[in-house]
Image: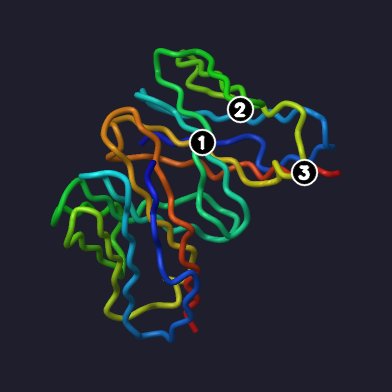
Amino acid sequence: SQTIHQWPATLVQPVGSPLSLECTVEGTSNPNLYWYRQAAGRGLQLLFYSVGIGQISSEVPQNLSASRPQDRQFILSSKKLLLSDSGFYLCASRSTGNQPQHFGDGTRLSIL
Amino acid sequence: SQQGEEDPQALSIQEGENATMNCSYKTSINNLQWYRQNSGRGLVHLILIRSNEREKHSGRLRVTLDTSKKSSSLLITASRAADTASYFCATDADYGQNFVFGPGTRLSVLP
């Protein structure tokens, strides 16, 4: 089965600082990869998804960007963080067809 | 766009009781999935039910799907304190390119 590695688990950053969150996947090849953000007590908002290396689709306009430099590596970035970027960020992976998503343990990002 | 909406938003029951959560959505789907999230953790997949299926079981979990009503339900039987978590439904209309999660049901199982 798939294993999703996300780090760091928690991160505190000042407003205006850059961001790089990394997600790596084990146990599958050529997965669909996803970045979600979750506000406290709320559902998941899809930020980006990728069907292959270098292929990124964005669901909402925002201060963030994503990249997929390798098949099983997905990176979430920002050049300058805003207070509104605070939240719980989740990476997920999914094989093709009628398959579930597998999630990492998330990164809790606090912007001060 | 399609959207899963869970009902109720919060549910509190005693250990040993059954818990039922419902999910409604708006458009045609290929499958519907239920996930559990413990506080501060990632989501764990529970059950996937395809659009041509009406019911699936996994241990103490039972999921039904009514595509004519665009609704699904998750039943947890003989609940335990360890079942305390948030439960989400997610709809998949195009095989993963656009999963849509509902806001979730927060289940509290009291010992």
Q: Which chain does tag 1 point to?
A: B
Nearer-N-terminus badge (1/2)? 2
| Residue B74: mark | 2
**Comparing labels 3 and 1, the label whose residue is closer to the camera:** 3
User: Residue A6: x, y in percent?
Assistant: 40, 63
Residue B21 placement, left or right of B29: right
**How far is the residue under mark 3 from the one under mark 2?**
17 Å
**How far is the residue under mark 3 from the one under mark 1?**
21 Å
User: On the rendered image, what quadrant is the N terminus of chain A found in?
Assistant: top left
Give the residue number, with chain letter if any, for mark 3.
Answer: B81
Q: Amino acid at mark 2?
A: Leu
Q: Is B66 situated above or below B95? A: above
User: Residue B69: x, y in percent?
Assistant: 50, 17
Taking depth in this image into account, of A51 and B1 the one nearest to the observer is A51
Q: Residues within 10 Å of mark 2 (few under 14, many from 20)?
A: many
Q: Residues within 10 Å of mark 3 (few under 14, many from 20)?
A: some
| Residue A102: mark | none
Q: Which chain does tag 3 point to?
A: B
Does mark 1 fall on the same chain as mark 3?
Answer: yes
Q: Marks 2 and 1: in contact by CB < 8 Å?
A: yes
User: Residue A19: x, y in percent?
Assistant: 33, 77
User: Residue B18: x, y in percent?
Assistant: 76, 27
Q: Residue at x 66, y 46 (%)?
A: B85
Nearer-N-terminus badge (3/1)? 3
Q: Residue at x 43, y 62 (%)?
A: A89
Query: At numbered mark 2, what does the secondary structure look like: helix, strand or loop?
Result: strand
Q: Amino acid at mark 3?
A: Ala
Give the residue number, with chain letter if any, for mark 1.
Answer: B89
